[in-house]
Image: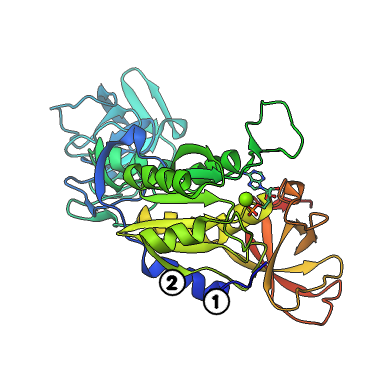
Amino acid sequence: MQASRYPMVSAETAIETILSMTPVLDPEEVSLQAAIGRVLAETVIAQDDMPPFAASAVDGYALRVDDGLAPRRVLTEIIAGATTETPVTSGTASRIMTGAPVPAGADAVIMVEQTNESDGFVQIDVVPRNGDNVYPRGLDITNGQTVLAEGTNLGAAELGLLATVGRTRVSVYRRPVVAILSTGDELIEPDEPLRAGSIRDSNRYALFGAIQEAGGVPLSIGKVHDDEAAQEALIRVGLNQADVVLTSGGVSVGSRDLIKPILARIGTIHFGRIAFKPGKPTTFATVDTKLVFGLPGFPVSSLVSFEVFVRPALQRMQGRHHVHRPVVQAIIEHSLTPSADRTEFQRARVRWSQGRLVAAATGAQRSSRLLSLVGANALLRIPPGSETITAGSFVEAHLVGELLDEG
Ligand code: AMP
Ligand code: MG
């Protein structure tokens, strides 16, 4: 083994370097049905008032306040979607349904539960006040109002709002296409029989899912032997078809670790070693405007490196303003031993317990043990040091999944 010739950078510097070279992708127009989870690339301004007319908020009677408690003669019935030419005049009222336009002359609606109608007259139980149960025109949205700003994440409410203002298509940032290539002579397909020395290629599937979870479009380039020409050819296939290329394996200092030399030859390596555990040899390069991440082969290292270094870049490319996970302080349930020289991201479960956030690591943290990521909803950021972190201390937890609630 030879020492890496790449200087060690901190995880923070690595993330800054990546984001400084990550472009926001061009906008594209999509239908509302396809817009969930996307990021708005335009500012949306209402072109009408909402409601577009003064509308009744209840089923009841539209009437004039200045008639007080006097009985009113019922003129007509106005249902939602209909209009009437008949104005409400002194001593009259019209039956009205929720959402129907309040007729001319009426200045309040009394809900049906507070009325009695017989022989064509309605008696009301409460003294009406001006504007009772009337939604004035433009109450919710006024013509010309900015309803959604550029950079808004589109969820269900935002899609409803777009439809409310009459939009069926919307401009959103394009999703990044991310190519994945597994390297290693030992790799077999998951459904092949195990042979002596072989390992199932799990990284390609895990990364495929991680890319989708991060809003990217995964493109599998397959797996390749530890052969420099073959690896370079497939990296070039990825560069031609994708915005980002991820490789797995082959970035350490072993004799068959060929990714760094290839990337140095066809592009520019910005860092090749991070003071980070698990995933020290994670490598970042650009080839023209495309990003290439050389992720380590160990399954935990590749997925945690993806989470910490690749995911923020994919978020940025989709136009998200906030690219990082929420960070909370959690109480660690057991003692932890920090790494001597690297910032470690330990996999953990964080739960809300009796008014506090409590964290517990997910068992052995070896970088080969994918089970340490199963069920994890947080990465505990443990700075390097020599002192044991005692149970009950606060640790920084990056929430990567749903918070668990145990009462
Ligand atoms: P490498 O980074 O290429 O030295 O790989 C380190 C170790 O990670 C290998 O010895 C394998 O055990 C494992 N590994 C590499 N690639 C994969 C993969 N695609 N899926 C699962 N495990 C892998
Ligand atoms: Mg390898």
Which dot marks residue 9? Answer: 1
Say how the picture is coloured: rainbow
Q: Say which amino acid is labelled 1.
A: Val
94 over 222 or under it: above or below: above
Of labels 1 and 2, earlier in sequence is: 1
Q: Residue at x 36, y 38 (%)?
A: 57
Mark 1 lies on a secondary structure that is loop
Q: Position of residue 177 (x, y in %)?
A: 38, 44
Residue 400 appearing in the image: no
Q: Residue at x 12, y 27 (%)?
A: 85
Q: Position of residue 378 (x, y in %)?
A: 67, 58
Which dot marks residue 267? Answer: none
Mark 1 → mark 2, Cα distance in angstroms: 10 Å
Sort mark 1 into few (<14), some (14-19) or many (20+) by Cα contacts within 10 Å: some
Q: Position of residue 255 (x, y in %)?
A: 62, 58
Q: Say which amino acid is labelled 2.
A: Thr
Q: Residue furthest bottom?
A: 386
Tell me the quarter of the picture where residue 187 sits.
Answer: top right
Q: Are marks 1 and 2 in contact (CB under 8 Å)?
A: yes
Query: Camera-side residue: 88 or 373?
Result: 373
Mark 2 lies on a secondary structure that is helix
Query: Camera-side residue: 285 or 19?
Result: 285
- In the picture of the structure, the residue carrying the numbered disc 2 is 17
Pointer 1 residue Cβ closer than 8 Å to ligand 1: no
Q: Residue at x 55, y 44 (%)?
A: 182
Drawn side of residue 42 relative to residue 393, left or right: left
Query: Camera-side residue: 105 or 319?
Result: 319
Q: Nearer the viewer, mark 1 or mark 2?
A: 1
Residue 236 appearing in the image: yes
Q: Position of residue 135 (x, y in %)?
A: 30, 44
Q: Residue at x 34, y 17 (%)?
A: 119
